[in-house]
Amino acid sequence: MLEPVPEGDTIYRLAERLRPALVDRRIVDAKIAVAEIRESHVVGSSVVAVSARGKNLLIGLSNGLTLHTHLMMHGAWHLYARGERWRMPSFRLRIALMTEEAEAVCFGAPVVRMLRTDRIDKDPKLSALGPDVLGGAFDANEAARRISQNPDRTIAEALLDQRAVAGIGNVLKSEILFLAKVHPEVAVGLLGEAELAAIFEITSSVMSRAVAPGRARRFALPGRVTRVTSRSQMGRGGELWVYERRGEPCFVCGTPIERITQGEDARSTYFCPKCQPASQETR
Ligand SMILES: [Zn+2]
């Protein structure tokens, strides 16, 4: 029986289904049946974003790499609980990503490859596609309006409220606040209109560009990065500015990155105390 060719909207829905199981989760194990992909490309990294570009599925990792799959006629992504029996024969396995709780398994896809997240726009297989196919135009004004309804909440907690802004995970939360130079513990009500607008402008850029922190780094702070920092020097944080970089020097000012936990769920937030000052006088 022929399955229908997965269309763009199918991949978009697939991305929506995989996202809650993968984003902000660390890949603790992997099964790989693609010669060019090594375990070290994926295991140990956190998933930063899951997005659709046309019929392509992109899974962005915290190490600055993105897993690109194209399902063509017969490929499929399945989501299972850890240890659950697969509903497809394992000889069709291409790649399986295991988190603590879930297994995302790709079967039979003809295109399975890793690429550098900051090169996605130059990739011949992906660059021809416009950003519109990512789906869901981001309305910054509406996001600002919703987030302002709880003025006492910290901005870091507010950004994770999926009813206010859908799609921001814990990794991007820290990155967005760093790029906006906003301290994570500032109450939403203390932020001016311009500051909220700046936060959502950055959010919009980061999210609509298939969520590529490496690229965000270049377009958001032009000229501010004075040191050339190679991937190896950047450590396990890959191309992220602050996430999981506690104690390591800020790429902009050299101040050690700090980590705090916030909200009922005690989610980690990473920030630079100098680039993101707490008091209004210095903002
Ligand atoms: Zn700094």
Image (spheres, rainbow, N blue to C red):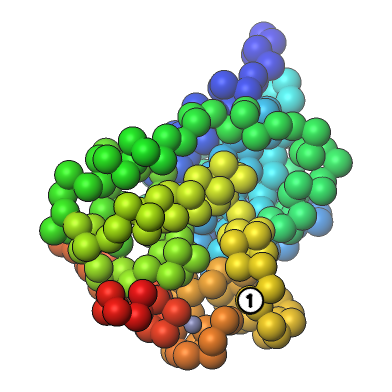
Image vertical order of residue 22 relative to residue 71, above or below: below
Q: Where is residue 274 in the image (x, y as percent from the top left)?
A: 42, 85
Task: Return the residue nearer the eye: 82 or 190.
Answer: 190
Q: Is residue 132 left or right of residue 187?
A: right
Q: Where is residue 202 in the image (x, y as percent from the top left)?
A: 50, 54
Q: Position of residue 223 (x, y in %)?
A: 69, 73
Q: Where is residue 50 in the image (x, y as percent from the top left)?
A: 54, 44
The answer to which image quadrant residue 91 occupies is: top right
Quadrant housing the N terminus: top right
The yes-or-no answer for disc 1 within 8 Å of ligand 1 is no
The answer to which image quadrant residue 143 occupies is: top left
Seen at 67% across and 50% down, the residue is 67
Quadrant housing the C terminus: bottom left
Task: Return the residue nearer the eye: 75 or 166.
Answer: 166
Seen at 19% across and 57% down, the residue is 189
Inspect this view and state whether residue 89 appears.
no
Image vertical order of residue 6 relative to residue 137, above or below: above
User: Under tag 1, what secondary structure?
Assistant: loop
Q: In this view, does 24 lie to the left or right of 115?
A: left
Image vertical order of residue 185 relative to residue 30, above or below: below
Task: Return the residue nearer the eye: 10 or 209.
Answer: 209
Task: Return the residue nearer the eye: 50 or 182.
Answer: 182
Q: Name the residue under label 1.
A: 224
Seen at 50% across and 31% down, the residue is 137
Q: Looking at the picture, which amino acid does disc 1 mark?
A: Arg
Query: Which residue of the protein is positioned furthest toward the top in this rendering?
Result: 1
Inspect this view and state whether residue 242 appears.
yes
Label 1 packing within 10 angstroms: few (<14), some (14-19), many (20+): few
